[in-house]
Amino acid sequence: FFREEFTARSAAVRVRFGAGVRKNIAEELETLGAERALILTTPQQAELAEEFAGYCGARAAGTYTNATMHTPVDVSEEAVRHAEELGADVLVAVGGGSTTGLAKAIALRTGLPQIAVPTTYAGSEATPILGQTENGVKTTQTNPKVQPGTILYDAELVATLPVGMTVTSALNAMAHAAEGLYARDRSPISSLMAVEGLRAFRDSLPRVLASPEDVATRGETLYGAWLCGTVLGQVGMALHHKLCHTLGGSFNLPHAETHAIILPHALAYNAGAVPELLAPVAELFDDDNPGRGLYRFAKEIGAPLALSDLGVSEADLDKAADLAVANPYWNPRPIERDAIRTLLQAAWSGDMPA
Ligand code: NAD
């Protein structure tokens, strides 16, 4: 992975890893000098907020259990008011990318420190990136102010992740690593993390599916999520992420499922342009074409394969292709409208990438 020139950046993040580590959160609050924690979850995970309030003990100020997909600005503003009323001095985000996004949005507006406790593999906790939605429009910014300073990775929390979400969330994470391998601003370290993240998922996912509650195996997936998320936080993304963003926004598709379906096709699209950079993926998934190798892996672990199953109609594909080429961006292979239309057709049908 050596390059003659590169610029590497990494965030100052404290990471604690281990089954049951969440129960030590009071120590983390003490380390930060924080005395009034606001605990954030989605409505579906509200019970976890209560559990965490117990661990925080006298340092728990309250909970806010209305984290919502796509980080709507009105929800963030309501949460900021709640934080101010409670006199919160730290945010504890327990959940997936939506909950982490809410904590980041509050931190952006208040400067409060954050402890992120992920329960999916999305990886937002490891990035200074925040996507927010206002009036139906999603905008993304990168700002060191939103990077959580502490992350607690507790495998017991992902052990309850349903099998379907496990698979799609893992492929969502793997997409960060795969695209990181050909990022223009990659460094030898980001590439090492990317390959190790992909390897961790490749090895552990089949075992997780065989015994979903095995905490040791779940730990290896979470290790993969940390590595893949860290890559996303360090380098720029390309075709795959832009395509998922466009499709997700225009057709209101679920985030992780969309990533799972598109990834093999996006890699196959780029493979010919950067064969040497994607060689580790080809090797890990045992196919000369990394996209095909990943497609086979996704199929084996029961991932969704077809955009048609997400409710996209075949008639939408022309519009999707137009949208995908509307705002030019860098990609190792030029974004060609006809080739993107072909890619979308295969992803819509669930066919193996050409
Ligand atoms: P999510 O946070 O939206 O969670 C989906 C649902 O699963 C929620 O109802 C949640 O409560 C539930 N859930 C989460 N963990 C669970 C568990 N262990 N057991 C049972 N249920 C659980 O989904 P996500 O895929 O983690 O995050 C997607 C969002 O994160 C998107 O909006 C995406 O844009 C954003 N994201 C941002 C970044 C970034 O760097 N800014 C990175 C990745 C994803």
Image: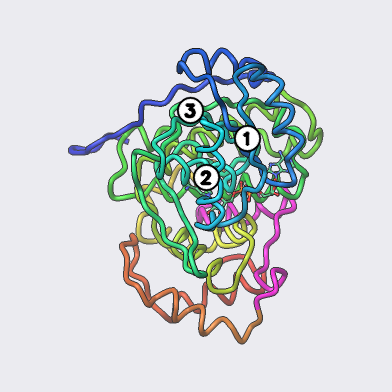
Question: Does the magenta segment cover residue 298?
Answer: yes
Residue marked by disc 3: 89
Q: Quadrant of residue 352?
A: bottom right
For residue 308, the mark is none
Q: Residue at x 61, y 87 (%)?
A: 315
Q: Quadrant of the N terminus?
A: top left
**Would you say residue 220 sits in the magenta stretch?**
no
* Residue type highlighted by circle 3: Asp
Relative to 269, residue 256 above or below: above
Quadrant in the picture for residue 52: top right
Residue 181 against residue 8 in the figure, above or below: below
Q: Which mark is residue 94?
A: 1
Camera-side residue of 75 and 307: 75
Quadrant position of residue 59: top right
As drawn, 309 above or below 45: below
As drawn, the label of residue 81 is: 2
Stretch of the chain drawn in magenta: 287-312
Mark 2–mark 1 Cα distance, whole angstroms, equals: 19 Å
Q: Are marks 2 and 1 in contact (CB under 8 Å)?
A: no
Counting residues from the N terminus, which is met first, the one under dot 1 or under dot 3? 3
Mark 1 nearby-residue class (10 Å; few <14, some 14–19, many ≥20): many
Label 2 is placed on what type of residue?
A: Arg
Secondary structure of residue under mark 2: helix
**Residue 193 rendering spot, x and y as whole percentages:** 44, 33
Residue ID at (65%, 54%): 296
The picture places residue 166, in percent across and down from the top left corner, at: 70, 44
127 or 99, nearer to the observer: 99
Mark 3, Cα crowd under 10 Å, few <14 / some 14-19 / many 20+, is: many
